[in-house]
Amino acid sequence: RLEFDGDVYESMSLQALAGHRDVRGRESNTIEITGRLCADSADRLETMDIEGTTYGRALEVTVVIPRNGWGGWGNEYAYVDVEARVPHGLGVAIRDSSGDVEVDGINLLSVDDSSGRIRTRRTTGDAMIGDSSGDIHVSEHEGSLEIEDSSGMIDVRNVSGLVLIPADSSGDIRVHGAGDVSIERDGSGDIEVANVRNGVRIGSDGSGNVKVVGVEGDFRVSRKGSGNVSSKDVLGMVEVPHR
């Protein structure tokens, strides 16, 4: 278990490998990190740890797992589940190789996860979420949000600013409630967008249906692939090209 004075730091990064991440905001100004270390042998367990390093007003928390085997391979395994309780205003960046990430009530800077589910709730700030595989669920975010995803579903609800998705290879995209929505390129999967205060733009849609409902600004599709495009209750212009 590690404890730090939250008044000393403006940001925290959590560098992790295999295991579950649970990061939650709280009223206290104390940063509290707890870990559950699991391994297939006592020798391997002794090489594992959680370390905290200070760089000016930035805190870096690193999960240490031996290089000769982490995750689960046959009878060999090593992983660390991490719980972090941080002040609401502390900017937090999370980098994870495998395992689920859950975030609630923090100032989110970024989440970068190679595999596993990402779930965020009641976050603030201009944030970036990147995931190679696994579903992404975002609920109640105050600020702008950029999501880069290779596969898995993207489900975004109630974002006050721009929701930007530069590229998504596969999986459905749902955005319900946003300031603006921009999906630059989508490979496959359906797109469903609703309740947008400004505009919706889709650069290129490969395959899958597109459904847009309730937009106070314009709705534009630059390039359309296979699948149907439908819109309802769009107050601005609607521009959808023929195939």
Image (cartoon, grey):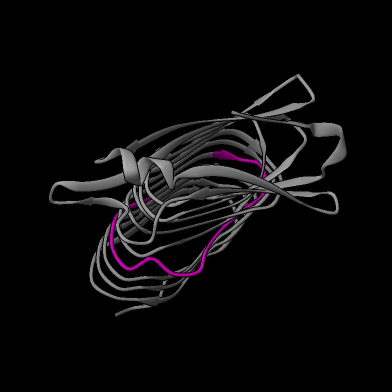
* Count of all numbered marks drawn on residues in the image: 0
In the depicted structure, whether residue 36 falls above or below residue 54 = above
Residue 192 appearing in the image: yes
In front: 46, or 221? 46
Q: Is residue 48 left or right of residue 177?
A: left
In the depicted structure, whether residue 70 falls above or below residue 37 = below
In front: 119, or 30? 30
In front: 153, or 241? 153
**Residue at horizontal 23 percent and vertical 65 percent from the top:** 227
**Residue at horizontal 30 percent and vertical 54 percent from the top:** 152
Q: Quadrant of residue 182?
A: bottom right
Expressed as whole percent of the image width and height from the top left, the position of residue 3 reads: 70, 29
In the depicted structure, whether residue 138 falls above or below residue 209 = above
**Residue at horizontal 27 percent and vertical 66 percent from the top:** 188
Residue 196 appearing in the image: no
Expressed as whole percent of the image width and height from the top left, the position of residue 185 reads: 42, 72
Expressed as whole percent of the image width and height from the top left, the position of residue 121 reads: 54, 32
Q: Is residue 241 left or right of residue 122?
A: left
Expressed as whole percent of the image width and height from the top left, the position of residue 42 reads: 31, 38
The C terminus - image quarter: bottom left
Region in magenta:
158-173
Q: Is residue 160 left or right of residue 223?
A: right
